[in-house]
Amino acid sequence: MRVLLSTYGSRGDVEPLVGLAARLRELGAEVRVSAPPDAEFTKLIEGAGAVHVPVGRNAQDMVKGVTIGAAKDARQLAAEVVAMRLDMLDAASDCDALLATGLLPAGAREVAERVGIPYVFAAFAPRTLPSPHHRPHRRPGRPFPPGETDNRVLWDIDAANVQDMYGEPLNAHRASVGLAPVANVRDHVYTDRPWLAADPVLGPWPETPELDVVRTGAWFLPDERPLPADLEAFLDAGEPPVYVGFGSMPRHVLEDTAEVTIAAVRGLGRRALVSRGWAELAVVEAAGDCFAVGEANHGALFPRVAAVVHHGGAGTTAKAARAGAPQVVVPQMADQPYWAARVAEVGIGAAHEEPTPTVETLSAALETALDPRTREKAAAFAAQMPVDGAAVAARLLTDLIR
């Protein structure tokens, strides 16, 4: 049994897929993971016993060179994504199934169809999938009409924007191999039976008759690494710090967010633990109350912090929730506003409405997160969360093959 898993994007897109790869390996499957060629991804994938099939350019270079919301950049990236997915044909040629996720994987379904194997699309957030119960996240292209409240209208606009970005390169390929054009690329890619790899408590799916959504639960990569000795020493040297990390967000998107956050943490008399991330964040005016750390085991770290301030990536949000750590989410793009809203709705932290906080607004959000009542709610919420979504997905995928 041989499976090809495909993604393109940041670590938040790659790591859950590697978690699935690890579970598939436990079931005896050979696994290939098509992902950007970044060295950190190679290490992750090979560490799970899978084969890394590099595609496209380095994700870090891509993130640094793209302006969020710019239609020109989005159109260029869409053409790149289609081309790189179609390049998977050789890697898929002797596989038994193909599962795709990450940036809209237009072209992956064509590869599966040409090889003659099952194709599955998986999303990491409910808001990715069309439903009358929620709005789509904004993409470049035709804007949403001001005041429009009909979610079906908004999802129709979303489909048109996806078609405008991906339709030409995808249909050019389809024509070259004798296939009819696709009039709705988004729904073609998603299929009418997509998988949702989100925690059912943190990110519940609202029943939608048009889609038969398979809910697996969130996918996590098992991580038994100890924390670095210098980080352990910092944690032991005082009260639990506030973790500040914005994952794969580039520096030009964050602007002064990290500096403002550290100032707010210090203003409340708290220590700060700064995760460098792809923006290469550093401590401000280095002192004993602030420490910078590289990539670390969040499962071991988050239970030991006072709160987690982050961008609202699906993986970070779920890991903090599983650890019972109060959160402050400062969303920047895509599904991040959804996760920020969910954190606030269930009472396990605060959502910062604007992507660029001030010391005052961030301090107010932190006060909510650091309230002992919020920690109590976060601990109770963590106890409700199932933890083995990747194992569920692995069994479903192997059943689909057999």
Image (spheres, rainbow, N blue to C red):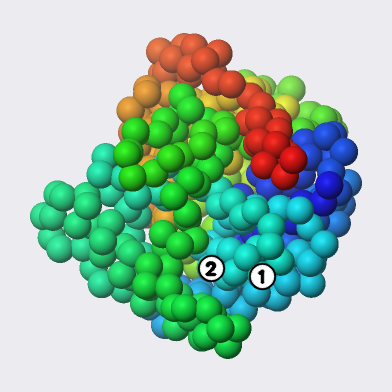
Residue type at mark 2? Ala
At x 31% / y 70%, what residue is drawn?
Answer: 160
Kindly state the secondary structure of the residue where label 2 is placed. Answer: loop
Residue type at mark 1? Arg
Q: Alpha-carbon neighbours of circle 2 within 10 Å: few (<14), some, or many (≥20)? A: many
At x 44% / y 15%, what residue is drawn?
Answer: 377
Return the residue found at the far left.
147
Kindly state the secondary structure of the residue where label 1 is placed. Answer: helix
Residue 149 in picture, x, y percent from top left: 14, 49
On residue 114, the disc is: 1
- Give the foreground label among 1 and 2: 1
Left or right of 149 in this view: 269: right
Residue 345 in picture, x, y percent from top left: 33, 28
**Residue linked to disc 2:** 106
Asked if the residue at tag 2 contacts the one at tag 1, i.e. Cβ–Cβ closer than 8 Å, the answer is no
Residue 236 in picture, x, y percent from top left: 74, 22
Marks 1 and 2, how far apart at CA: 14 Å
At x 82% / y 51%, what residue is drawn?
Answer: 2
Q: Please determine whether, in this image, residue 47 is positioned above or below residue 55.
A: above
Task: Using the rendered image of the protein, determine whether residue 331 is visible from the camera's viewpoint.
Answer: no
Left or right of 12 in this view: 52: right
At x 53% / y 43%, what residue is drawn?
Answer: 195
Left or right of 386 in this view: 331: left
Task: Using the rendered image of the protein, determine whether residue 49 is visible from the camera's viewpoint.
Answer: yes
First in residue order: circle 1 vs circle 2? 2
